Amino acid sequence: MDKQEMEQHLREIAFKRSTAFCYQCYTKCPDGHCSQCGSDDLMRCFDGVGVEYGTSWIVEHILSEELAQANLEEAFEESVRQCYPEQTTVGWMTFDTLRLMKEQDPVSWRCALGEYESQEESDENIVSFDGGSTFYTRDDLEAFIGDEGS
């Protein structure tokens, strides 16, 4: 499933979990029209959270509450550990390679982590719906969407 399909499914989930709401009359309108004023220009009400137009805010809330963010730092560290030996010897001293890299050149480490993040996003292993502030793994999103569909 590509990102657009995921977004569509998440909008459907948000729509199912929320109710149409007439802000003018301040009443829920489950049939899609306000029974008091007849308006069909309705917001969405997500109980316990708020009222607003659209569903993107509902999707963001649902994801933040029900799905763990991708731990890119941990995944990057694991990737580095697979590429390099666990320990590095300098003279007579032995160091943890990962710790040595992080501590001796933190700028390079952050740059490499940023490149890793970009590559994972390009490969669609991680997905963001807020411009890259928060990432979720593809597997977690697909499982969440699948669970909601059943």
Image (cartoon, helix red, strand yellow):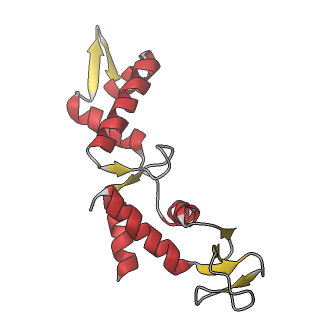
Left or right, 129 with reference to 38: left
Give the quadrant of the N terminus: bottom left
Identity of the residue drawn at 33% across and 43% down = 121
- Residue 128 rendering spot, x and y as whole percentages: 43, 50
The image shows residue 108, relative to residue 131, as above or below, that is above
The image shows residue 50, relative to residue 120, as above or below, that is below
- Residue 147 rendering spot, x and y as whole percentages: 37, 76
| Frontmost residue, 133 versus 27 | 27
Q: Outermost residue, front direction?
A: 38
Identity of the residue drawn at 74% across and 86% down = 37
The image shows residue 35, relative to residue 140, as above or below, that is below
| Frontmost residue, 96 versus 139 | 139
The image shows residue 97, relative to residue 130, as above or below, that is above
Identity of the residue drawn at 49% across and 48% down = 134
Give the quadrant of the C terminus: bottom left
Left or right, 139 with reference to 43: left
Identity of the residue drawn at 68% across and 85% down = 28
| Frontmost residue, 113 versus 123 | 123
Quadrant for residue 141, please give it. bottom left
- Residue 27 rendering spot, x and y as whole percentages: 73, 84
Left or right, 60 with reference to 138: right
Left or right, 31 with reference to 49: left
Quadrant for residue 23, please give it. bottom right
Q: Outermost residue, right direction?
A: 25
- Residue 38 rendering spot, x and y as whole percentages: 68, 87
- For the image, the number of numbered tags is 0
